[in-house]
Image (cartoon, grey):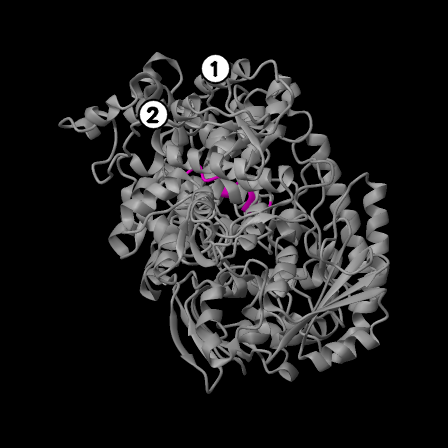
């Protein structure tokens, strides 16, 4: 490889030799070597605006594998990029050669010494795993970026990551004691202080440039992350080789092991939220709080949290964590704030911190529904200059006609912001470049650093001469050449970079006509639009990887059950979005809608809709999957290629209406499951002897109707007892019930199997049954998945039919209907614990606040589990899905059932959830309506009361 080569796109890609390179790697390493289309497509991007196509990936098993990969790649002239969680903001986790994935095998804790307060870790270790291991000893790792649940220690060291607690515990560089690294030429070094591990020539180079190193770096910057930290190599600073290596973005060596410092956890953390008139006032106040030794000083303004629910009075806030209530009281007295809240409750603190942690994604959705992007993500100025900088920065945004939402680490002078750059057009990209140059000059004028946390990468490295001058930046290049004379490690990052406006990931997604004017289309409104529109919608995934939370039991929420079960990137929301992005570009994935790589990745998507709510930027993979499947199987040959389950489970409402109980006998026939495309591990649900609608038709009622009860397919044919129980409760509440005068269906099963044309026909017939709309009664839907389909899928698939919007607006859940229509009714007092699961569609679309209030008033105690049950309609019945389906249930649902008190009632409003519980346990899940109806039958005390 040519020394000092500038263009990483021209160096070492050697795609014509990819097969030879892959074969050599497979012979040399024990880990997985993957040069497949899927592996390459998954690693073209990180969490930045940039895209580079790698030759392939390797998941090394140990340090010996890392050394072997470097030896083979050096022999083939191929660059190497080390990658952790892939959440880098500057583009430094992308590459054109071989990408090393450390998360698969090199993510362990080698040792933890609570006495010495150190841990030895491997680079692929996710930060939260280290924190969980240290917590029993009252210790933690100090740096804590908002991606702590998925970022890795290797990535943190590579970027010198910081996080909210850096005012107390410093950056990652402050918390690393030693590093084992391998250079591109195969030297295995252990880095430390006093010159330990320095490659030959480094100390001599530093010795020749002492004056430049002593004067070339800005002072008073706790968050100076840009460039190499060569001043750490000064004699008066202990010739700290390990500190100088932190933040080098994988350009000097590849980390195989790290010894890190642990710090004591606060004894009693208290969160003080201080309200100020505006952002500038909050920034001006932040430096004055540092004398109180806070653990955090985080800032955000009203444009990030416009509803300001749960926050004290003001237009901007500082989140200041201190240790103990006495410290909190002193801080409140000393702070010149408009208002203050002191939060000691851990649950309340978590809820408030979640606002801050989601900001990287939340800020990506600009006001008015547009998109905002990184690109000027995390500069830092001296804390005393922050207020002045922010005022001038806001003015600069206005001058350029841009909008952004600053927030971040005000105590350290570090500001995060996503800006509504137009990165889709040539004119917009030119505007992006001009703004970047102007704001770089503004930061430097305030004595700041272009990067205060996430590193330079491609996004800012070109601008480093404005901050450091050409001489010091030239020294950066000389240091790179000492460590890596072949230029094989992450070329184009930090040193000799490409232009900041080249290699953008949006370049392959040009505008596609009128539909592309403005923000990308969302949801199932995509149906029928060109492929590029689906790519543009998937491109809203910025890669912060909240969907990559590790393993079973890894936290609340739903997203992403298939990733939690498999641990594979392609089965995460981000991974699928990346594949759809690449499908639309057509460079790596070349067969468009017929792509088997995309189909295989979407095959394990449960369409749980969790990403619709849990993803900070609202990626809606269930909708994208439906759109892809619809187009993948389009045309006569496509119809023949569809899985049989699409015709059986997808058309289940039709078959139940036609055959009814006859399906019970059919499913007992030999090979029935195989013919129906159903996995033999599953027991098929039994069709009821009498449907709910037939039972309702035989009963007389003289009550004037107050609502329309929706007879969904599952309730009508498979669990009519739920419908009967709901009628019993609703009528006890004084509400007359009617059913639609004809067969209705929400179309859910057609949507989930990607049969959107059939879904539209079914939906239109349903609207015809309900037309004229009558007296506008609320429509009460007992099955959460059907209610979610009516609220979201229906208006998205029929956007031009005003009846669809009217029906969607009229939908109420069972609990919502009781709360809204019978506010004086008191449910029976059941006074017992409950366990079970909130339906994933209810979590994602409907919300469960009304259900929680109804359960509380009925004396039902305990929280329901999150996650997805794993059955998910047709998903758990399809061949090849059983193991993943069970693993999803083991994530949260089954542990919750096992841990519940013996007398706990098992609540599961969704038919799939109840079926999964019945299949995998000895218990029986019931709808909330059933529990309340039983209480009424038993004569438990209820009656009317004033309000909820």
Is residue 565 something one can see in this rendering?
A: yes
Where disc 2 sits, the SS reads: helix
Q: Which mark is residue 676?
A: none
Residue under the point 78% across and 57% down:
443
> Residue at label 2?
646
Where disc 1 sits, the SS reads: helix
Is residue 6 something one can see in this rendering?
A: no
Q: Is residue 571 above or below residue 67?
A: above
Part of the protein shown in magenta: 606-616
Point out the tag, 1 or 2, that comes first from the N-terminus. 2
**Position in image of residue 103 (x %, y %):** 41, 57
Residue under the point 37% across and 39% down:
912
> Residue at label 1?
761
Q: Is residue 157 above or below residue 87?
A: below
**Position in image of residue 238 (x %, y %):** 60, 83
**Position in image of residue 551 (x %, y %):** 39, 56
């Amino acid at each position: 490889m040519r020394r000092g080569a500038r263009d990483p796109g021209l160096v070492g890609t050697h795609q014509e030799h990819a097969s030879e390179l892959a074969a050599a790697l497979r012979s040399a390493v024990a880990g997985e070597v993957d040069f497949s289309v899927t592996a390459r497509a998954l690693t073209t991007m990180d969490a930045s605006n940039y895209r580079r196509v790698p030759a392939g990936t390797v998941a090394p098993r140990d340090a010996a594998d890392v050394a072997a990969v470097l030896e083979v790649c050096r022999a083939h002239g191929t660059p190497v990029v080390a990658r952790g969680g892939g959440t880098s903001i500057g583009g430094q986790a992308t590459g054109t050669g071989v990408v090393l994935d450390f998360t698969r095998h090199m993510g362990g804790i080698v040792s933890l010494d609570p006495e010495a307060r150190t841990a030895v870790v491997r680079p692929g270790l996710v930060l939260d795993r280290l924190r969980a291991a240290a917590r029993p000893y009252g210790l933690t790792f100090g740096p804590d970026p908002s991606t702590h649940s998925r970022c890795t220690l290797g990535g943190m060291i590579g970027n010198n990551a910081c996080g909210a607690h850096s005012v107390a515990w410093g950056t990652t560089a402050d918390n690393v004691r030693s590093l084992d690294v391998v250079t591109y030429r195969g030297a295995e070094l252990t880095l430390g202080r006093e010159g330990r591990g320095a490659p030959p020539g480094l100390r001599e180079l530093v010795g020749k440039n002492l004056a430049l190193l002593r004067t070339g770096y800005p002072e008073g910057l706790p968050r100076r992350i840009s460039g190499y930290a060569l001043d750490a190599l000064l004699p008066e600073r202990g010739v700290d080789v390990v500190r100088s290596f932190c933040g080098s973005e994988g350009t000097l060596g590849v980390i195989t092991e790290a010894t890190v410092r642990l710090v004591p956890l606060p004894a009693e953390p208290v969160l003080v939220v201080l309200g100020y008139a505006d952002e500038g006032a909050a920034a001006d106040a932040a430096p004055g709080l540092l004398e109180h030794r806070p653990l955090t000083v985080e800032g955000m303004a009203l444009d990030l949290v416009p509803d300001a629910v749960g926050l004290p009075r003001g237009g901007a806030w500082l989140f200041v964590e201190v240790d103990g209530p006495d410290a909190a009281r002193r801080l409140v007295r000393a702070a010149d704030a408009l208002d203050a809240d002191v939060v000691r409750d851990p649950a309340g603190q978590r809820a408030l911190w979640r606002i801050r942690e989601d900001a990287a994604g939340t800020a990506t959705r600009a006001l008015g529904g547009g998109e905002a992007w990184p690109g000027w993500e995390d500069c830092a100025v001296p804390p005393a200059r922050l207020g002045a900088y922010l005022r001038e920065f806001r003015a600069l945004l206005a001058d350029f006609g841009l909008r952004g939402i600053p927030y971040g680490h005000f105590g350290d002078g570090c500001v995060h912001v996503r800006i509504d750059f137009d990165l889709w057009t040539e004119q917009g990209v030119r505007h992006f470049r001009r703004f970047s140059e102007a704001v770089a000059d503004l930061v430097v004028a305030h004595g700041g650093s272009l990067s205060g946390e996430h590193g330079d990468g491609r996004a800012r490295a070109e601008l480093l001469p404005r901050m450091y001058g050409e001489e010091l930046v030239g020294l950066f290049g000389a240091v790179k050449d000492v460590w890596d004379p072949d230029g094989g490690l992450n070329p184009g990052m930090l040193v000799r970079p490409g232009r900041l406006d080249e290699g953008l990931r949006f370049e392959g997604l040009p505008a596609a006509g009128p539909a592309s004017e403005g923000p990308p289309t969302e949801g199932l409104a995509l149906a029928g639009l060109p492929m590029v529109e689906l790519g543009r919608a998937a491109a809203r995934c910025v890669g912060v990887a909240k969907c990559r939370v590790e393993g079973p039991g890894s936290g609340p929420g739903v997203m992403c059950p298939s990733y939690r079960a498999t641990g594979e990137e392609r089965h995460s929301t981000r991974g699928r979005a990346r594949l759809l992005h690449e499908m639309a570009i057509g460079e790596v994935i070349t067969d468009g809608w017929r792509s088997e790589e995309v189909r295989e990745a979407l095959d394990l998507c449960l369409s749980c809709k969790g990403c619709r709510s849990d993803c900070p930027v609202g990626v809606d993979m269930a909708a994208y999957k439906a759109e892809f499947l619809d187009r993948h199987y389009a045309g006569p040959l496509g119809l023949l290629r569809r899985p049989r389950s699409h015709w059986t489970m997808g058309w289940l409402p039709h078959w139940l209406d036609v055959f009814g109980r006859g399906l019970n006998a059919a499913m007992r026939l030999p090979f029935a499951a195989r013919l129906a495309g159903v996995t033999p591990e599953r027991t098929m649900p039994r069709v009821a002897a009498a449907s709910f609608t037939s039972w309702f038709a035989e009963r007389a009622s003289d009550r004037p109707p107050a609502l329309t009860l929706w007879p969904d397919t599952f309730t009508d044919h498979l669990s009519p007892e739920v419908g009967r129980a709901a009628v019993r409760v609703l009528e006890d509440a004084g509400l007359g019930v009617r059913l639609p005068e004809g067969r209705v269906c929400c179309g859910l099963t057609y949507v989930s199997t990607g049969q959107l044309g059939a879904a539209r026909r079914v939906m239109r017939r349903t609207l015809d049954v309900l037309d004229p709309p009558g007296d506008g009664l609320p429509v009460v839907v007992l099955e959460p998945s059907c209610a979610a389909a009516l609220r979201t899928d229906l208006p998205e698939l029929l956007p031009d039919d005003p009846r669809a919007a009217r029906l969607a607006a009229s939908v109420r859940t069972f609990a919502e209907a009781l709360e809204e229509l019978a506010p004086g009714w008191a449910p029976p007092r059941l006074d017992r614990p409950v366990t079970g699961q909130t339906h994933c569609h209810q979590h994602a679309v409907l919300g469960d606040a009304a259900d929680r209030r109804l359960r509380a008033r009925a004396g039902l105690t305990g929280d329901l589990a999150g996650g997805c049950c794993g059955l998910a309609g047709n998903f758990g019945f399809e061949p090849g899905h059983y193991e993943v389906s069970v693993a999803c249930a083991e994530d949260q649902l089954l542990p919750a059932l096992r841990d519940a008190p013996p007398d706990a009632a098992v609540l599961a409003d969704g038919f799939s959830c109840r079926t999964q519980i019945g299949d995998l346990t000895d218990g029986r899940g019931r709808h909330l309506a059933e529990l309340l109806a039983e209480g009424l039958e038993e004569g438990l005390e209820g009656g009317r009361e004033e309000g909820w």
